[in-house]
Amino acid sequence: MPSRSRILAALLLSVFVGSAQAQQKASPPSDNIVARGEYLARAGDCIACHTAPEGRTFAGGRAMPTPFGTLYSSNITPDRETGIGKWTAEDFYKAMHTGRFPDGGLMYPAMPFASYTKVTRADSEAIFAYLKSIPPVNQRNREHDLRFPYSNRQLILGWRTLFFNEGEFKPDPTKSAEWNRGAYLVEGLGHCGMCHSPINALGGTSQSDAFKGGLIPMQNWYAPSLTSNREAGLGDWSIKDITDLLQTGVSARGVVYGPMAEVVHNSLQYLSDEDTRAMAVYLKGISEPSPPPPASSALPTTESSLLISLGKTVYDKNCASCHGAQGEGKPPHWPPLANNQSIEMQSAVNPIRMVLNGGYPPGTEGNPMPYGMPPFAGLLSDNEIAAVVSYIRTAWGNRGTPVSAREANELRSAPLN
Amino acid sequence: MFSRCAVSIVLYLAACDFATAQAANQPPDTMAARVEACTPCHGNKGEGTSDVYFPRLAGKPAGYLYNQLLAFKSGRRKYPPMNYLLEFLTDPYLQQMADYFADQHPALPPVAATDASQEVLQRGQSLVTRGDPQRQIPACGSCHGPALTGMEPGIPGLLGLRPNYISAQLGAWRYGTRTAKAPDCMQQVAARLTEEDVTAVAAWLANHPAPVNAAPAPKGTYVLPFACGSEPD
């Protein structure tokens, strides 16, 4: 009987909300340190950097292009010769907490120790226990390929003085336990700030700019501010829409794509309902109300009105079949464009890239068969791309600004992966 | 939501009305709607488009298509717009996409006129049907089938492709930008071909009409001259 009603409930729910359902997810049992470590390693998304395409899990060797040259991630399997088999739990905690190798050498901040420093000793030990339990892989680390002078690790000292604040997470006693759990995950293991903060010329983020949004170097995707409601601040989102987005990659308000699709695919979809909700509560809490932007435009108005009327023609022909004549979409699978913050932001990089490259939200347990958007790079001219992006940024009450054909053209050469 | 639905018949009926309205406001629950991201390049049913480098997908063996999708996903086969689209999709979903296109049967395109000389076409035909034993080149048909329609699960047919696409793929194998599962038999074949051989086989294949039944032969119909990782035995 109970199982029947569950099936019935599931059926009803799926008709109601149009699939994309987050499954019930529980936290790992607290008495199993290896299972807990595996869960926390997911929350830290170690796999994204420490596993190469088609490579062995956690054997490293993934190339990470930076403005200073290419870094290669390390083998963190318990192989004694080429991995971290000889490390102690103390060595490991020191690496996570202080960004130093066992011999005291400095790590490049591409390893997100500036966030992981907030991880508790107990959680660090669980992750270490898990890493010790996976099969060792004998694979030597590849030398980094950095230009002079960046190849000199002493330079990291300067970076650390400016941007690194060592220290475990300190709960805010004025906030709920749930809020603090969310903060711990977002600021620590989730290393969300690594992308969602402006990166200055030194490749660092100052504390005061945390979560204020920024263009990710080399990838040319804009990671929006998580505090401003004019970007990805989630102040006026419901908790359910936020947890849907984090757990399944799609929601009634918008979808993830580009680097954020990676984060959901490899990490966030595996978090328990409880932890996901805690993150949502925290994210909703840190958003700051911001005044509506002035509806001004960098382009002369006659030019922009011509652009926008061409844009409507392009839209009706190529986009309305999925996103709706009024930008209403068929959420969550075909996202709404009306009142969608992520296309109205000051930076138009993301909507231009979406139109050029199309995309699929990540395949997740809650949304295993996502719907996709075709790339339009080969079908539309620079002018048509600029026109349709200008149109969706300004139609239906959207408060974005028009974009130029030159901006569209520049993003044609953005790297795709 | 369930309990609310179940407690009152009135509410239940109202909910069902609402549910139909919601379903109508959803994209069709079909594979066709899910692969709309692919069709501007590959055609509505995978029949191909006017772009000579965009291959037909329809009717190819599902195992072959799946292998290609895995290779694009990992970046082993390179075409950045596709590498990007597939990066975060799961393997079972890629299998469903492969099955979907394998099940489509739009008509093959009519054979295009060729400007290749009779001599070139003859050289192509001879390589495809007999190979060149002196240079240890097996007949293409020894793997791709006597009717060149391929074999389940991993060997594609060679008809209905355009000459530019065939040359580009053989070139990609020779230069190492396309690789298949080891042992990569197709790489061993392509490495033995000269530029002239490639032009000749591409011209003849593109000019050769397909048989009425262009379906791939069932698994194990014939024995390959040497082992291919894509076609496990």
Image (tube, helix red, strand yellow):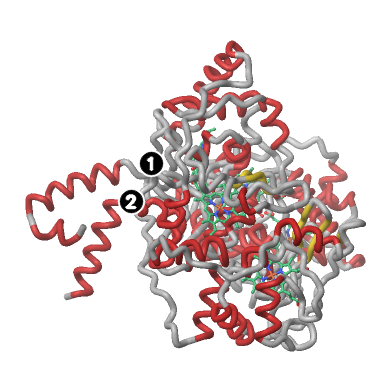
**Tag 2 secondary structure:** loop
> Splitting the image into 4 quarters, where does residue A168 fall?
bottom right
**Circles 1 and 2 on the same subunit:** yes
Rendered residue at 63%/54% (across/down): A207
> Splitting the image into 4 quarters, where does residue B173 fall?
bottom right
Q: Position of residue B162 (x, y in %)?
A: 71, 44
In the image, A93 versus B41, the foreground residue is A93
Tag 2 residue: A18
How far apart are the alpha carbons under marks 1 and 2?
A: 9 Å
Above or below A403: residue A223: below
Residue A310 visible, this angle: yes
Disc with the residue nearer the chain's start (1 vs 2): 2
The three-letter amino acid code for the residue at tag 1 is: Lys
Tag 1 residue: A330
Q: Position of residue A114 (x, y in %)?
A: 66, 63
- Marks 1/2 in contact by CB < 8 Å: the verdict is yes
The three-letter amino acid code for the residue at tag 2 is: Gly
Judge left or right: residue A149 versus residue A119: right
In the image, B31 versus A409, the foreground residue is A409
**Letter of the chain that mark 2 sits on in the rendering:** A
**Letter of the chain that mark 1 sits on in the rendering:** A
Above or below A85: residue A320: above
> Splitting the image into 4 quarters, where does residue A248 fall?
bottom left
Q: Position of residue A216 (x, y in %)?
A: 68, 48
Image quadrant holding the N terminus of chain A, namely: bottom left
Rendered residue at 69%/37% (across/down): A411
Q: Position of residue A383 (x, y in %)?
A: 65, 23
Residue B192 visible, this angle: no
For mark 1, does the 10 Å Cα neighbourhood hold few (<14), some (14 to 19), or many (20 or more) residues?
Answer: many
